[in-house]
Image (tube, grey):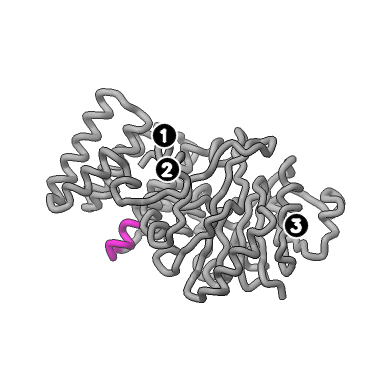
Amino acid sequence: MPAVSVVMVCHRDTEWLRPAIASVFAQTLKDLELVLVDNGAGLSVQSLGELGRDSRLRWVQCPKNFGIPKGHNLGIAAARGEYIALLDHDDLMLPQRLERQVALLTAEPSLGLVASRAATVDQMGRIIGREFALLDGAMQHRYTQFGGPVVTPAYTGRRNIFQALPYREEFTWAADFDFLARAAEQFKFSASPEVLLHYRRHAGQTTVVQAASIAHEQCVIRLLTARRRAHRPENLLGAGQALEEARGAPRDVASMYAQSATDCLREGLVVLAVYHARKMLAIRLDISAVKTALEIYGAALRLAPREAGQLSRLFFTGPLRAYGFKSAEVDKIALVIG
């Protein structure tokens, strides 16, 4: 039984798949398996050449593309390792990633998930920057009310966490954010200070092609997270129905944030209402948007006057400054719209 199972889901064969697989087999920690979920891509051992003949490669072959959440869950179900490491099919692990992260998990049994810094690379593999990363565990937990504290493919954790919290298929594009938010409520997070992942950004990646749908799902996930943390029912069924109705009908993202902020006000979730009002302004800064955002901000202050200082900092400066989050990548702070 391997120490680590690396789970990778792919739905098409690309120029980056083989380098991603090779980066797994090049790890300094050799006691691993790569669970490759062929999500309808039609891959074969022969198509991967020498990589396909590595004894550490295990296949989960799907007759069609079941989507990212189900593909991920199928990979987890097939994994045999004590630890699970995530990797997207277009990213690269640096050689010491698993060794470093497993050492942290082994040394501190209370840890559930360990991430790392990640360099941003372009489609040619050239380093063009750093990904936003919060390394402190407490900061990671708190930031999950807003977004992912580290890019998800940088995480490695104990298998029982992934088994206990499967990806929820209601979220076609943002199930990883939902997973991190739920995991942060039950398990301790940490991170290695080293860059152990190359995260590829290119025009064809899901985060670009499905940006509007991802934003919509993230709004719903934030709402469910806020409800849970306020000790209220999630109403996942209602959220799933709303998402299903919205699919196939692209919405104006700024208007979506405004509607979400209004919904949050109705439930008394003032922090999230102010956050989404700020997100709306980051997309559309015109007189109408400013008027709407100020109305939402004012309503939040009236609902929670004792939180006026924190809400004002959130609205005018964003969550990083409002909550004292210290990004490991200082140059990204100005780029993260809070």
User: Is disc 1 in contact with disc 2, using a CB cutoff of under 8 Å?
Assistant: yes
Q: Amino acid at mark 3?
A: Ala
- Could you tell me which residue is drawn at 46 percent across and 39 percent down? 331
Element type at mark 3:
loop
**C-alpha gap between disc 1 and disc 2:** 9 Å
- Report whether 192 appears left or right of 74: left
Element type at mark 1:
loop
Looking at the rendering, the stretch of residues picked out in magenta corresponds to 225-232
Query: Which badge, 1 or 2, comes first in the chain's sequence?
Result: 2
- Could you tell me which residue is drawn at 63 percent across and 54 percent down? 87
x and y percentages locating residue 305 in the rendered image = 12, 50
Give residue 145's mark: none
User: Is disc 3 in contact with disc 1, using a CB cutoff of under 8 Å?
Assistant: no
Residue designated by label 1: 251
Give residue 216's mark: 2
- Report whether 286 appears left or right of 80: left
Q: Quadrant of residue 235?
A: bottom left
- Could you tell me which residue is drawn at 40 percent across and 34 percent down? 253
Residue designated by label 3: 26
* Farthest top residue in view: 287
- Could you tell me which residue is drawn at 43 percent across and 59 percent down? 136
User: Is disc 3 in contact with disc 2, using a CB cutoff of under 8 Å?
Assistant: no
Q: Amino acid at mark 1?
A: Arg
